[in-house]
Image (cartoon, rainbow, N blue to C red):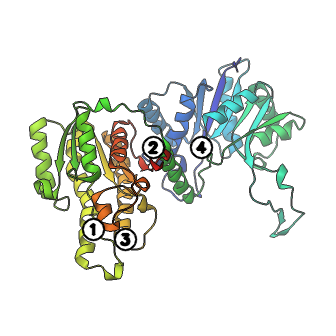
Amino acid sequence: MERNVKTVAIILAGGSGTRFGSDVPKQFTKLSGRTILERTIDIFEKSNNIDEIIIVSISDYFFHISNMINNNKWKKIKSIVSGGNSRVESTLSALNEISKYQYSDANILIHDAVRPFVSEKILSACVEALQKFPAVDTAIPSSDTIVVVDHESMASAFPDRSTLRRGQTPQGFHLNLLQKAYDKIREGTDFNTFTCDCGVVKSMFPDVNMAVVHGDERNIKITNPIDIFMAETLIYMDKENIDFKEDLKNLEGKNIVIFGGRSGIGKSIRDIAMSYGANTFSASRSENAVDVSDIKSISSFLEKIREKVGTIDAVINTSGIMFREEFSLSSYQKIQEMVDTNYMGTINVALMSRQHLLHSQGCLINFSSSSYTRGRSLYAVYSSTKAAVVNISQALSEEWQEDGIRVHCICPERTDTPMRIQNFGVETPSTLLSPDAVARKTLQTLLLPETGLIVGVKLSLDEKN
């Protein structure tokens, strides 16, 4: 539907996040290499439904946000304004800013900065609803029974759950209506009695016809530390299902080092990258006596490659060892070997690769496994080291982002590799990923401009059939 007026997004990022227990406000906490605020703004910046953006933030973070705007090359940011002590005061601050631009009218969408998974579908629904209604809320059905209490005791009968919704954002308004509501609220109403802008408008104008559009369970508000875990999981799921469109022809001419490139997934990465014109250099114990648990052998190998080709554009570490047996029956030697290869090997490769990737502004890709999500019986050490690989990949992606080094981690499901056969025997091929499928997704990830991705690779329906 054609829009007749400008749509301005107000992103409320002024919270201090006292419940979050972090050194920085929660909106500046990072998710897979990008701050929560950055992810939220990016959605509005890329939306065809949004014309301008006003950010309400803590004044101490203005410089940080300005750098964020420059680094992301955002064009829609109209201004950054200081927030108040409450949500209502922060919205009022944004409205005061908007009044300087003397719009005859506009659509206003107000969104929590800590809801970084709002969808374009929701934005479209809100803007479309504002064609017919002066105000709109975003909400989802309540899956839980709501209890009304008074000092810890039941205050009334259970409300009819079919009529209840859980509010989300954005909330949308015609600018003139919102301004009138806030003009009235200035007359002495206690700001702290309101928790949202729809509440302000409905309180000031009880008869206003307010639409409700369907939100999304994914449109979570990051409030407590556990929400970070949920958000990371959502990002992980997004990367499992993403339709990677990066053209592997862009690998041509790139210099790629592959640790563990003699067999399995590493060999597939090498073969596919070469077929697209990349220069690949494989390292492993059996191939050229390069052991990822030996930091000197890694350093020597990388230095020889640098001397030969000048720059190293990417380092991919697929090396891994698994001994599948009960923990109490495992020899200390086997445990040490898994830790040295799977975890310390990841650290060693990262340490020795950094200087080369700093020079090329390149990419480091580590390998974990779908088993990283919980400890697995009969391979406790293996699964725990793979969890550590995910953690260090996330940490390095944040530490090295400003240096221009991208860091990712690939987490494939069960894959038809020699290590799998050695530990689990021969399995039905249709139940396993092919090394080539994992290799292609790895190389496509290498070409992405993002950092900090934890990319799950699952067996597709086509492969299962």
Give the residue type at disc 3. Tyr
Determine contact: label 1, label 3, CB under 8 Å: no
Q: Which residue is depicted at the point 27% across and 64% down?
A: 321
Mark 1 crowd level (few <14, some 14–19, many ≥20, 10 Å Cα): many
Q: Which residue is mark 2?
A: 34
Q: Which residue is mark 1?
A: 338
In the image, residue 270 sits, relative to residue 424, either above or below, namely above
Q: Where is residue 137 drawn, in percent x and y?
A: 75, 39
Which mark is on residue 93? none
Q: Marks 4/3: CA distance?
A: 46 Å
In the drawing, does residue 224 fall left or right of residue 126? left
Q: Which residue is mark 3?
A: 379
Which mark is on residue 14? 4
Determine contact: label 2, label 1, CB under 8 Å: no
Q: Where is residue 396 drawn, in percent x and y?
A: 34, 51
Q: In which quadrant of the rendered view does residue 422 lie?
A: bottom left
